[in-house]
Amino acid sequence: MGMKIAKVLVFANVFVSIGLLAWAVSIYTNRLSYFDTTGENATKGQFSQYTDEIKRLSDGVQLAQTSYVRAMDGLISLEQERAFRAAILKILMDEVAKPGNPNAEFRVAPRHTEPELKGLIDVFKYSPNNPFPPATNLRGQPLKGFGRLQQEMTNLLKDEKDKTDQIRKLREDTNKLSIEIFDDATKTGVQSEVFKMKVIFQNLGDEEVYLADAQVNWEEQLRTLKIRKDQLARRLAEFAKGN
């Protein structure tokens, strides 16, 4: 039993020795060269490689910082432009969506033609004194905004209420006049008087016809009397000559 253990330990010692030998050879053949070498096979040492790597990283950091500053400046400009664009768009949206503006109209905003801004509204062409031209509907009239439509609706409702009140007052006046003229319930009013007046006017018409005939007879009688008077005067003149 002791011999077997001894043999195992010997073989283990041999394998460990071989492994340590291989590790030592590998380290020797792949040893690091910390300093530069000269001659035909000149190589950079590990320190030089570290120095180059640090320089490369420093240049990258400097480039990144420069790019960051440039990007930050561009971002500030874009943020200012975005704020200005948002303000102009709010003005345009309030013009068509905010109530209480009787002159609200949709407007045709010009667009950017640059590739990076193509399709966006060119807000730099906007001016309160020179607003964008109004958009038109199918009939060629300006497209009205909410405030203007609301004001027109308010005016229409007011006109409708005024007309309704006027119609109601006219109906009440008509009913009062109808009751004043003729009341079906009490049989009072001026309707009967109107009928009497109609009869009186009709009688006056008949009397006018009658009087017209009488006037013709009176004129004929007057003419006859004048003739008789002339005859009598001639006879009296004849008698006066004879005497």
Image (cartoon, rainbow, N blue to C red):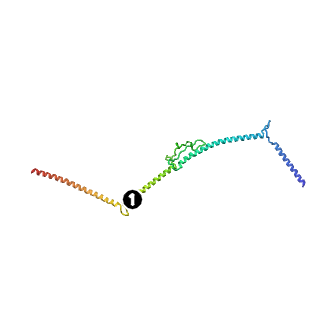
Q: Residue furthest bottom?
A: 186
Helix, strand or loop for disc 1 = helix
Left or right, 174 with reference to 108: left
Side (left or right) of 230 relative to 147: left
Mark 1 lies on residue = 176
Q: Quadrant of the N terminus?
A: bottom right
- Residue farthest to the top? 39
Q: Position of residue 55 (x, y in %)?
A: 73, 40
Residue 193 coordinates in the image, percent (x, y): 33, 60
The correct choice, above or below, for 36 with respect to 158 in the image is above
Q: Position of residue 87 (x, y in %)?
A: 57, 46
Q: Which residue type carries mark 1?
A: Lys
Determine crowd level at label 1: few under 14, some 14-19, many 20+ residues with C-alpha closer than 10 A.
few
Q: Position of residue 96 (x, y in %)?
A: 53, 48
Q: Please count the marks in the image.
A: 1
Asked whether, in this view, residue 227 is left or right of residue 51, the answer is left
Q: Considering depth in this image, is 133 or 129 the residue closer to the camera?
A: 129
> Which residue is at a point 39% across and 59% down the rendered structure image?
176
Q: Between residues 84 and 140, which one lies in front from this camera angle?
A: 84
Residue 64 as seen in the image, left or right of residue 133: right
Nearest the viewer among 126 and 117 is: 126
